[in-house]
Amino acid sequence: MASRVRISFFSILLICITAAAQGRKSLYTTNEFLAPSPVNGICKTLVETQGYKCEEHTVTTNDGYILSLLRIPTGLSGKKADKPPVLLQHGLFCDAAIWLFDSPEQSLGFILADSGFDVWLVNGRGTKYSTGHTSLTTYDKAYWDWSWEELANYDLPASVEYVFDLTGQKIHYAGHSQGTLVAFVNLSQGKLLNMLRSAALLSPIAHMNQLASPATKLAAQFFLANVSYMQNNRLIFMLVFLQNNVAKFVGGICSTLNQPCINLITFFTGPNCCLNSSRIDVYVDHEPQPTATKNLIHLSQMIRTGKISKYDYGILNILHYGQLVPPSYDMTKIPKDFPLFIGYGGKDYLSDIKDVKVLLNDLSNHDADKLVVLYKDEYAHVDFIMAIDAKQVLYDPMIAFYNSN
């Protein structure tokens, strides 16, 4: 494995988007990527087509972003949920559709609904169905002035509070990749504990400086310089455009590289063992979703420093934080009696096994009966949301964990 040439997720994505942007500048002034109608939304295209009921909800964060939330209130049988709500939070470059890509027998969103849970799925800010804002549009540079820290401080609390207030019940949480980071940030500060029952965290992202790929670390060292010359946030505008054209775009990359698209995903995430290759086209029809340049810079800072810290503004830190270095989040502060389920894989390029072990060391004092750790040696990053055997390997133990809490 170590001898393989690994291609950096950030560097490939940046190169591809930059190359596309050079010839497509006129796209930045079109109205082509305004928010689509719910008629063509996830409820209509991925949920109701499978025979499930689906509700569209919106919630506004304290900093003005209008998020789309989906609810699957019953299983396929139509029986109303008789178990607590579960809130599913996607990761970087994804939206709520990731929990619904495979068949109902293999997709976590449907499996939870059929198991009696009240299922809620979040579309994070800037993604296709969450482009609204109380005063800004996606054309405004200020709209994209956020990183994962704002997702943790605004998006997650708004979503959790909305579901808690509407249902009157404490919530189970499930996050993948970046969706775990925003949970860790809140839990380490003792936040949301009055509204959450437990958290299942898949491919956890916390410590990031032991990534196995030298190319990824090199990309992190130069990422800010690589994107800073893109005036008017063109990287972001291109991402927003690509959300409606990603199948052709990614297909073109695969064709150019003379590789199946499943191999391209492997370059980004690690050698996923168990994906249904027939569903890859569904995946590239929906992903990647937009994110902010600032978010990628912040993640790169984590890779360089090995710390889970606030955004580093350089010499301006003194103005933002009253100190020269940004404050860090301490994972050892996560309450030891809060129920946690952590799933990680031995082939994951983005949630590297060495970094996960550092996280588990942070949790070494966690109450033994409140921490479940599931390790799957052959799983890589996407296996945790799309593996054909994930129900038996991962989701059934998760549901048992939820039922016990």
Image: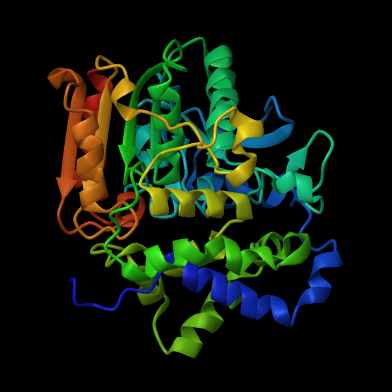
**Quarter of the view holding residue 279:** bottom left
- Residue for point 36% across, 28% down: 330
List x then y, in percent, for residue 76: 42, 36
Q: How is the image coloured?
A: rainbow
- The tally of labels here is 0
Quadrant where the C terminus lies?
top left
- Work out whether 71 lies above or below 125: above
List x then y, in percent, for residue 10: 48, 65
Res 200 visible: yes
- Work out whether 9 lies above or below 86: below
List x then y, in percent, for residue 392: 19, 45
Q: Answer left or right for 193 relative to 39.
A: left
List x then y, in percent, for residue 360: 21, 35
Q: Nearer the viewer, residue 34 or 366?
A: 366
Q: Answer left or right for 35 relative to 189.
A: right
- Residue for point 22% across, 28% down: 363
- Work out whether 388 lies above or below 357: below
**Quarter of the view holding residue 9:** bottom left
Quadrant where the N terminus lies?
bottom left
Q: Answer left or right for 308 relative to 335.
A: right
- Residue for point 20% across, 20% down: 370
**Quarter of the view holding residue 60:** top right
Res 46 visible: no
Q: Nearer the viewer, residue 215 or 19?
A: 215
- Residue for point 61% across, 50% down: 294
Q: Nearer the viewer, residue 302 or 163?
A: 302
